Amino acid sequence: MNPALRALNHFGLGARVGEARRLDDPRAWLRAQLRPGSALLEGGGLPTLDEAGEAMRRVREAQTAADRPSVQAARRALQQIRQREGIAALTRRVATEAPFLERLVAFWSDHLCVSVAAKQPVIPLAGLYEREVIRPHVLGLFADMVLASARHPAMLYYLDNFQSIGPESAGARAQARRRGRERGLNENYARELLELHTLGVDGGYTQQDVIALAKILTGWTVQRQVRGGPGGEGYAFRPALHEPGPKTLLGRTYDQGGAKEGEAAIRDLCAHPATARFLARKLAGHFVADDPPESAVERLAGVYRESGGDLRVVSETLVDLDETWDPANRKLRTPQDWVVGVLRAVGAREVGPPVVQVLQALRHPLWAPAAPRGYGDLVREWADPDSLMNRAELARTMARRVGRGALDPARLEEVVDLPPDDPLRGFLADESIATDERVALAFGGPAFQWR
Amino acid sequence: MDRRDFVRGMCLGGLATFAAPLVTFARVPARGRLVFVLLRGGFDGMAALIPVGDPAYAGLRGPMAYGGGDVTALDATFGLAPGLAPLKDFWDAGELVAVHALAIPYRTRSHFDGQAVLETGLDKPTGASDGWLNRLLQVMGGDRSGIAVAAGMPRSLAGPHPVLSWSPTELGTVEEAYVERLHVLYRRDALLQDRFEAALQLQDLQKEEGMDPTMGVRAGGRNRMAPVLEATARFLRDPLGPNIAAVEFSGWDTHANQGMAGGALDRLLGQLAEALGGFKADMGGAWGDTTVVVMTEFGRTARPNGTGGTDHGTAGAGFVLGPGVAGSAVLSDWPGLGQRDLYEGRDLRPTLDTRALLKGVTSGVFDLTPAQAARIFPGSESVRPVAGLMR
């Protein structure tokens, strides 16, 4: 096993030509990437919450006016915001010198995912969500990340909490009087917060806990942007929509009133041993192997508990674990990682709109999973026949674009850890095969599918 | 030499050391075709197969209750949602069995666990990772094959029996020589070889069928289900093509603004019904031995929630379509909708195990013995196939 290639490919986003030889101390290189604050992605004309809110307001106004062309134009503007975010996120992944950190960002972004495929207001917010919720906390406390997620309009819209109302709240009673329609609880976010974000499905909660948590989180909603109103489409706590009275979640009573209940409940959930175990298994499943050794899971869970959910310490443990370096533990590159890996291998430094489209075709677009569980992460979820052929076709197409002149295909054997007798070596060196086809073979063949 | 000959030549000919279990198409056309349509997200069975004749229905559903005039009546209790009205053609032809109060054998309101149980055919979400359709192929032996017409391999079809997958994409043209070299590389990869070879075979089938690899999906038609089922028909009707297809559609998790006739859910149901009608027509003569099963991971709450939708529940509805069903009927040991009838006071109570339905269907379509059916659904020995479902 080549430890430099292991660090670059298994922990990172793919080796560049020549990079493995320059990497003297792979573990130190990985640890050095874990600098708090360095994951931020901001400024540079990136969309803002104000801009997203403004774009959503235009859609709502066009819809109210039932003017088809302006609805379509307003919707295109939402997609353009998403596109700018997508290009920025992918450019960071392709260009970064801290690819392990970017992998962590992608991991937590998927763990607490929102989806542009589910709800229109998420479209202009998903990239912002990753930049405002995930990046600032990727090396911080997990509880802070979950709290930021719970308060972000993208999540509030995505899992419906923005419209969940305490059935006994003053707001619900007033609405019933005024409009004769009863509004009330929506369990969606509370259930996924327990099942997918914190405890895990076997974490020992009941339907009553789901309802209690949904009540605790009533009033956590979105302040909609209105014309001439204050900027943003941000989080607001509305006391009038909050369910009054004490609630019991996992045997603990929350009766502080207001938004404090949700803050306390989320902190307690994040500190729960079931959460430590659930997150440890998922991290090990992503960074070690589909079915990770129990030793790795236990170590990560222990570190999570002892550090109070400090993700920097947990991430360092991934580097320390022998299991992560064991070449027997390998993972299939997801389509996003495969595309980014190809671009890094050929020395790209930025990406354009076609790459965003390509991820769609590989059914791994940014921020668009079909369900709140996020994207799959197992070999069997990505290595179906059709997907392998799609990658082979795309490798050929990409190689035609990059393959002429600049790149020596023979050097691509440096970016994967090939056995000495692998026939790819022969192909890459075989000058009777067209240069761009040799480039395609490096990326379309099986070696580059693994990390 | 076309690619199929090339693949066969490599695997059956001189390079015997590399011979691996390829996807084997039927040499002799085999009887029986099955399509498993999974609606991911938990479709609201009570808003699809509507218990409009249950005395508690209108009160329970409140503003989300359909009136008798809105639904296509099937019997004294049940009717089809407005969007599903086209299924009446199947009903009139004696080709539709609708089931209600159907649920997986494991009580969960989790999408992920629910889908895992439904797709593995087990009684809990942990255990074997292969899907029940894959086990069905294993049990029936090598002369049948399966295809996922889906983006990715659904768990129901995943497993050791090599299977095909297809989705409407084309990311560039490739030369034969390039693919042949890739094949040389893939033969060194014990885990991926079968899958790559299955993809090669599928390309040939696609070529034989003269299929546009994108099936017009990129054009963005209104009904996204119709082209998927059209493609399924083109693969399945080929006498030497696959016998089993797994198809899936998402978007059924209607927590808010579910709507009524013409609303969000009903539009999806309408697309589904239209796509199923198109599928039958596209199958042509091959429809005669084809059966389609439509299922979901769970039903939804019996009452609407506070946001004009429904939350995760327990029992729901399902549909079996095809000339092989024993005449149109609603099969349900209907538990009723009174407060005490509801499961945990909130969900439709399950009275029919999804495995009983699937055992009934597969046994009928493929003439399985009880022992074979039990191997497809391990641990289900005590679960008897639904009687009188198939001819």
Image (cartoon, coloured by chain):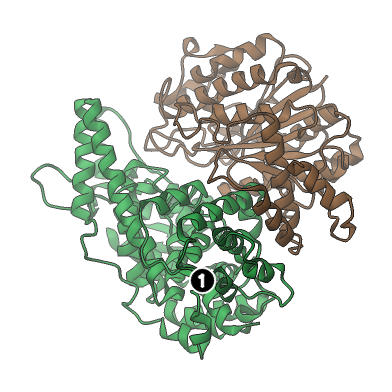
Chain colours: A green, B brown
Asked if one can make out residue B381 in the rendered structure from this viewpoint, the answer is no
Residue in front for this viewpoint, B139 or B299: B139
Establish if B150 lies above or below A415.
above
- The total number of labels drawn is 1
x and y percentages locating residue B115 in the rendered image: 62, 46
Which class describes the residues within 10 Å of circle 1: few (<14), some (14-19), or many (20+)? many
Q: Name which residue lies at 71% across and 78% down.
A: A420
Q: Please tell me in which quadrant of the rendered image residue B103 appears.
A: top right
x and y percentages locating residue B354 in the rendered image: 71, 36
Residue A144 vs residue A404: left or right? left
x and y percentages locating residue B67 in the rendered image: 46, 14
Q: Which secondary structure lies at badge 1?
A: loop
Q: Mark 1 lies on which chain?
A: A
Residue in front for this viewpoint, A234 or B352: A234
Q: Name which residue lies at 64% across and 62% down.
A: A432
* Identity, as a three-letter code, of the amino acid under mark 1: Gly
Residue in front for this viewpoint, A379 or B209: B209
Identify the residue position indicated by label 1 in the image. A14
Establish if A315 lies above or below A248.
below
Residue A68 vs residue B149: left or right? left
x and y percentages locating residue A222 in the rendered image: 25, 49
